[in-house]
């Protein structure tokens, strides 16, 4: 992408993504991308030197709950659909020798 023209090669991107698009779709995508680039360029013009970064978009502090066990899952029920278990663990075929 060049800074002067904001041109993005849609056909090249479609080829990389292994998708086929027609010329009308390519032109529409080019217009959409140019609109996004213009919007971002406009946002970049805003002076944010005295603006502190947000930790959260909410003004209120986050309420955290205590990290406590709230239920006891039934291991047998959870593993019922597994092809094989051993000692309470799911067993899977070895993939690394």
Image (cartoon, rainbow, N blue to C red):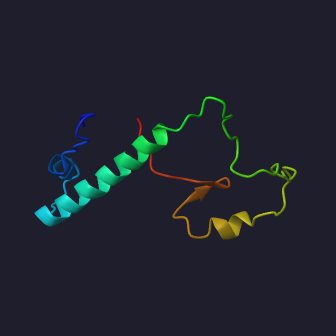
Vertical position of residue 8 compared to residue 3: above or below: below
Quarter of the image where the N terminus is located: top left
Is any atom of residue 22 visible in this view?
no
Vertical position of residue 72 compared to residue 63: above or below: below
Vertical position of residue 44 compared to residue 21: above or below: above
Please provide percent x and percent y for residue 29. 25, 58
Task: Judge left or right: residue 48 versus residue 28.
Answer: right
Q: Residue at x 81, y 63 (%)?
A: 72
Task: Judge left or right: residue 33 versus residue 74.
Answer: left
Residue in the foreground of this view, choosing between 23 and 93: 23
Question: How many numbered marks have been drawn onto this rendered protein structure?
Answer: 0
Please provide percent x and percent y for residue 28. 23, 62
Please provide percent x and percent y for residue 48. 59, 34
Residue in the foreground of this view, choosing between 8 and 66: 8
Residue ranking furthest to the top = 49
Res 55 quadrant in image: top right
Residue ranking furthest to the left = 23
Q: Residue at x 18, y 59 (%)?
A: 27
Res 20 quadrant in image: bottom left
Q: Residue at x 37, y 51 (%)?
A: 36
Residue in the foreground of this view, choosing between 36 and 78: 36
Quarter of the image where the C terminus is located: top left
Q: Residue at x 24, y 35 (%)?
A: 4
Residue in the foreground of this view, choosing between 79 and 40: 40
Please provide percent x and percent y for residue 79. 62, 65
Is any atom of residue 80 visible in this view?
yes
Task: Judge left or right: residue 63 versus residue 53.
Answer: right
């Amino acid at each position: 992408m060049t800074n002067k023209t904001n041109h993005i090669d849609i056909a090249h991107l479609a080829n990389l993504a292994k998708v086929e698009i027609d010329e009308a779709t390519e032109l529409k995508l080019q217009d959409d991308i140019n609109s996004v680039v213009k919007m971002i360029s406009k946002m970049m013009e805003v002076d944010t030197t005295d603006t502190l970064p947000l930790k959260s978009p909410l003004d209120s502090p986050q309420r955290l709950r205590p990290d406590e066990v709230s239920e006891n899952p039934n291991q047998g029920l959870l593993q019922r659909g597994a092809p094989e278990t051993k000692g309470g663990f799911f067993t899977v075929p070895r993939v690394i020798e």
